[in-house]
Amino acid sequence: MTCSDTSQRLVLTCNPEVPLMPTAGRVGLKNIGNTCFMNAGLQCLCHIEPLVAYFLNREFEHDVNQTNLLGCNGEIAKTFSELMLSLWQSDHSVHDPTDFRCKLSQFAPHLFEGNQQQDVQEFLAFCLDGLHEDLNRITKQPPPVTEETQKTDQSLENKEGEEFAAALAWYRHLERGKSFLVDLLQGQLRSSLKCSQCGHTSRRFDPFMYLSVPVTKDMSKVTEAISKYLEEETLTGDERWFCERCNKKSRCNKKD
């Protein structure tokens, strides 16, 4: 089955009225001057099938947040939608992404400074964050969490255990950021620090949309890089952790 066949089945199942061209999902992006990093990142994003359906079915229009101070007034989401249409609903084999680049450079000029090749990870990070904030369903941010609330949360976490602590941390996260990007791509990372002297353990639960994993030449699978990332690490020297029980910096073991 071709890539085009797969994408057509998915999108048409979501909305039978969405027209797709024979070249759907197989349209290239023109290099407009050291933009390989941008094109590679965009092709990855534009072939995440649930994301394709979300934009081609125009569902994103209901989520555009034009009041979010952290967003781009919905401009990134709208421009990304136009790019999706060009890759999935045009009859061309190559698309010129100049309009997308121009729009993006208005909000992130550092990505295109000097027309030099840039880091694709940084580019993807900006796109994902920009789309999330433009489509954030939280239109009115809650007040900052007070010190009293933090103490109450900590007391509940100590009483109810780790699973409750993880759920509460995720709930606090969703109070400020909830979007299709969060539903589709975000997860929660648990990191722990254990003092090698007294055994005291501190745990954190943080949201993530992307991970930077170590890659070596002998790796052949993504799972190998993830396994390497999850290996326990010993922090010594300047990286020692301040243990609240020992009341000093101590050698500790860190594990995500």
Image (cartoon, rainbow, N blue to C red):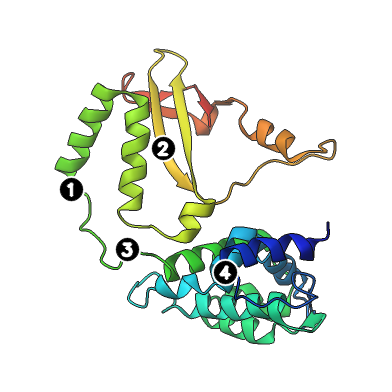
Within 10 angstroms of label 3, few (less than 14), some, or many (20 or more) residues? some
Task: For mark 1, give the secondary structure.
Answer: loop
Query: Residue under circle 4?
Result: 15
- Contact flag, marks 1 and 3 (Cβ < 8 Å): no
Residue 40 placed where, x, y %?
74, 66
Within 10 angstroms of label 4, few (less than 14), some, or many (20 or more) residues? few
Q: Nearer the viewer, mark 3 or mark 2?
A: 3
Task: For mark 2, give the secondary structure.
Answer: strand
Of the 4 image quadrants, the one containing the N terminus is bottom right
Q: Amino acid at mark 2?
A: Phe
Q: Is residue 199 above or below residue 140?
A: above
The one of 64 and 21 positioned closer to us in this rendering: 21
Gap between marks 1 and 3 measured at Cα: 20 Å
- Contact flag, marks 4 and 1 (Cβ < 8 Å): no
Q: Is residue 175 above or below residue 132?
A: above
Q: Is residue 36 above or below residue 75?
A: above
Gap between marks 4 and 1 measured at Cα: 45 Å
Relative to residue 117, is residue 139 drawn left or right? left
Query: Residue under circle 1?
Result: 146
Q: Amino acid at mark 3?
A: Ile
Q: Is residue 225 above or below residue 132?
A: above
Where on the picture, by quarter, is residue 136? bottom left
Q: Nearer the viewer, mark 1 or mark 3?
A: 3
Gap between marks 3 and 2 measured at Cα: 21 Å
Query: Residue under circle 3?
Result: 138
- N-terminal of the two: label 4 or label 1? 4
- N-terminal of the two: label 3 or label 2? 3
- N-terminal of the two: label 1 or label 2? 1
The one of 3 and 39 positioned closer to us in this rendering: 3
Task: Indicate which disc residue 207 carries.
Answer: none
